[in-house]
Image (cartoon, grey):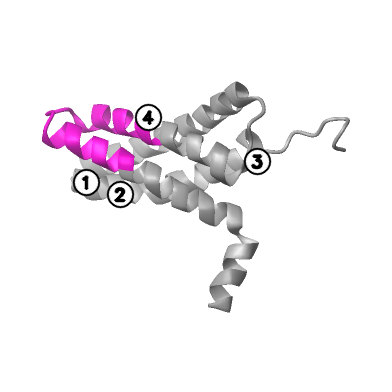
Amino acid sequence: MAFFKDIFGRNRQFVLYCLIGGTGVTLDFLVYSALIGFGGWGYQYANAAGYASGTMLSFILNAWCNFKTTDRIVLRFLSFCTAALLGFGASAGTLYLLVTEAGFNKYLSKLATIVIVVLVQYNFNRLLSFRKIQTASNG
């Protein structure tokens, strides 16, 4: 148990980012699957809709619960959306390669994109979207 506490203590933001991201990914995948399965949407359109819904949820939870930032919320949201667009580009490109070019299952392919997207977006958001802004009063 001490091992897990130590890992969590040293990597708290990343662990929380992944847990919060898990909720966003779950919403993303549910929307994606529902739009394909019940709505008859193409996989790229469903990917865009699912990705947008997961991104909104992740921003709200990360801003309030993980990085605890409430200042410059519009600017932070735009930065978060920029990271999301980078992640979406990686997701859409990987989906295209796996589904269209390689013929893999579109549901499993969607899951495979998650690892790439998490790494790209976490680092962008940690370094830019949710960084603490220094002012004259706090150093």
Comes first in the chain, label 4 or label 3: 4
Where residue 139 appears, as percent x and y from the top left, is: 87, 38
**Given contact means CB atoms under 8 Å apart, are the residues at marks 4 and 3 in contact?**
no
Comes first in the chain, label 3 or label 2: 2
| 124, 30: nearer the viewer | 30
Q: CA distance from mark 1 to mark 3?
A: 31 Å
**Which of the labelled discs sits on residue 52, or is there none?**
4
Comes first in the chain, label 4 or label 1: 4
Q: CA distance from mark 4 to mark 2?
A: 16 Å
Q: Secondary structure at mark 3?
A: helix
The answer to whether residue 68 is left or right of residue 99 is right
Q: CA distance from mark 2 to mark 1?
A: 7 Å
- Closer to the camera: disc 4 or disc 1? 4
List the residue tagged with mark 1: 107
Q: Determine whether 115 is above or below 59 in the image.
A: below
- The magenta stretch spans residue 33: yes
Q: CA distance from mark 4 to mark 1?
A: 17 Å
The answer to whether residue 115 is left or right of residue 71 is left
